[in-house]
Amino acid sequence: MLQWNRLAFFDKHFLLDSINKAFEFSEAFLAKEVSKVVKAPSIKTGSSLKKGYFSESKSVTSSIKEVKLTAFDVNQLKVANISGMYGGEAFIVFGDASGLIYIMNKNSYISAFTGFNYCLTHIKVLSKDLILAIGYDEPAPKPWLLRFWKFDGNFTTISASRTVKLRKPAPSAFVTAFSILNISLMAFGFNDGSLLILFGDVTKKKKLTEKIISESSSPVTGLVFQQKNLHLLLFVVTSDSVSCVELTDDKNLKISCLDIQGAPLHCSAGTTSGDISLAVSKNAPELSCVHHYDESGKKATTCFEGPIKMLHWFGSYLLVVAPKDEQTDLVTLCDLDNKIIVYSGVFPLVSFVTTAWGSLYLLVNDEHKLATLIEKDIHTKLELLFRKHLYAIAVKMATDHGLREATVADIHKRYGDHLFSKGEFNRAVDQYLRTVGIVEPSYVLRKFLDENHLPHMIRYLQRLHEGASSQEDNCYVLPEYTTLLLNCLIKLKDEAELELFIKTNTHLALNVESAFTALRQAGYVQQAVLLSKKYRRDDLYIKIIIEDQHDYVGALRHMEILSVEEARNLLPGISSVIMRAARLWPA
């Protein structure tokens, strides 16, 4: 496995354990009992469409025998016979090779009914009340059937059903892959490389438009519909190729080959971003690659140790199932963007993987258990990231989840503290800058009191003042912080930055007299003049032009523009100095 950070973002549970005592009747008995209540919808004979592949059955309404289960048992739901598992909004469905269909709700209630009289090969859930499956009622070479069932809200009654007869592209062909975009667009891949695309609402239309594509002679192992940038795409994976079909309409299909290497069954999966990922085992048995494609071709590759037998996307996480030994599989969840492993665990041999109710479900062979991986809450995941000092990932995760600004700022503070402890002061300041307005400034400033950290303190103080254009904005900028910044700039002897700060920062709370005195003592007379003018401190302005510049005429001219009251208040302090300079007052 790649040398990524390993975390535990998921908890492992076995939802359903062995039920030898709880479930007392056998699978055969269950099938017998259910068949008394539910009969498979019959197919009309002699109703095949001359130019199509389809026939339909009458809608039926049937009761479903509901059985309260707490687990799957080796004698009841035999994994060897389970031919499909799929999760939907309201339930998970299981189909077995004998044609039975099991529906499990969130409370682990399982309902069962006969879907096909002979065999079921594929099953999907299209909405919260609609199941579609592929199978047949009679042995080959009879046609394969696409059948759907619509249920009432309690899943105790089938409110409608329909059967569509699939004609094989070749006598020996059978379905190897099945994908649904919606009720009006489906695709079927066959073992001879043929692809059948159906256009039209299968629940209503008698005549459906079909397109057959035969671009490969290798078995179709994966089909993924994707909608991206207003384009409707169908990725087709065979054992030795990857292709993309652009579906403009049912008459215009644009096919492009993306790669001349493919993937085995269960080793291709669509991403939430509109791409597709597939696993390819290299000649070296110790290495496998997961290639990621968009409509233009391969765009990235991730390497893993050992062979891969199954891929499944769960949100932004890629689930990889790899054989560990003859009896167990290694299940790994990867965050490819952040290069972290969010879960890794050993399971009995995994047969199927699906997603339901915000969690992952794995059907495993040992005692026929249904395992679930439940994602931990965001705050627990953040704590796990903190322990590994993965603060950059924590910030991204908190932002993606829309957490409060204060929470995100706290992560930046933690990140800054971590970098500061490592002596990476510039990077630490980068993080502290993102806390301005939320974290108390004194917390940061205390870290940079040493004179060697003067540039770092200045960066932080400048950012503190940047947005302070009104009293509301700078409520956290105390006069002491502004004075401190001016003193730091003076110590650094950065005259240009000092003057720029005085000119551009307005409405700042400032201890003007302290700043004025510091500027004068450091010899920055012009900057002191600028400061006194900006804050309309006429007394300080007159003082500096008299005492430092000896511009007595300028002082008098400045007093001319003042009001009588302002001039009267200033005269006692400067009259003796001016008169002494004019030799009208004894020294």
Image (cartoon, grey):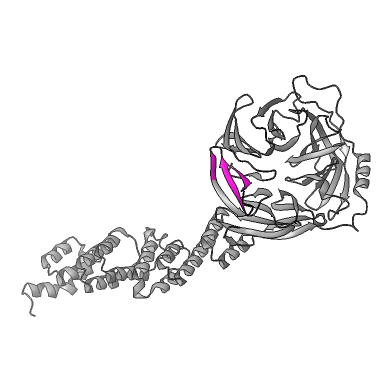
- Looking at the image, how many numbered discs can be counted on the residues? 0
Q: Is residue 345 left or right of residue 396?
A: right
Where residue 28 appears, as percent x and y from the top left, is 92, 46
Residue at the outermost left position? 583
Question: Which of the 4 image quadrants contains residue 251?
Answer: top right
For the C terminus, the quadrant is bottom left
The vertical placement of 546 against 182, above or below, is: below
Q: Nearer the viewer, residue 426 or 587?
A: 426
Q: Residue at x 63, y 51 (%)?
A: 318
Q: Is residue 351 left or right of residue 508?
A: right
**Is residue 560 visible to us here?**
yes
Q: Is residue 229 left or right of residue 474?
A: right
Where residue 231 appears, as percent x and y from the top left, is 57, 34
Where residue 523 appears, as percent x and y from the top left, is 20, 71
Q: Nearer the viewer, residue 161 or 323?
A: 323
Q: Is residue 279 magenta?
A: yes
Residue at the outermost front position? 283
Residue at the outermost top position? 50
Q: Nearer the viewer, residue 215 or 177?
A: 215
Q: Residue at x 76, y 57 (%)?
A: 327
**Is residue 536 visible to us here?**
no
The vertical placement of 554 against 44, above or below, is: below
The vertical placement of 25 against 256, above or below, is: below
Principal secondary structure, stretch drawn in magenta? strand
For the N terminus, the quadrant is bottom right
The boundaries of the magenta stretch are: 276-299
Q: Residue at x 30, y 58 (%)?
A: 504
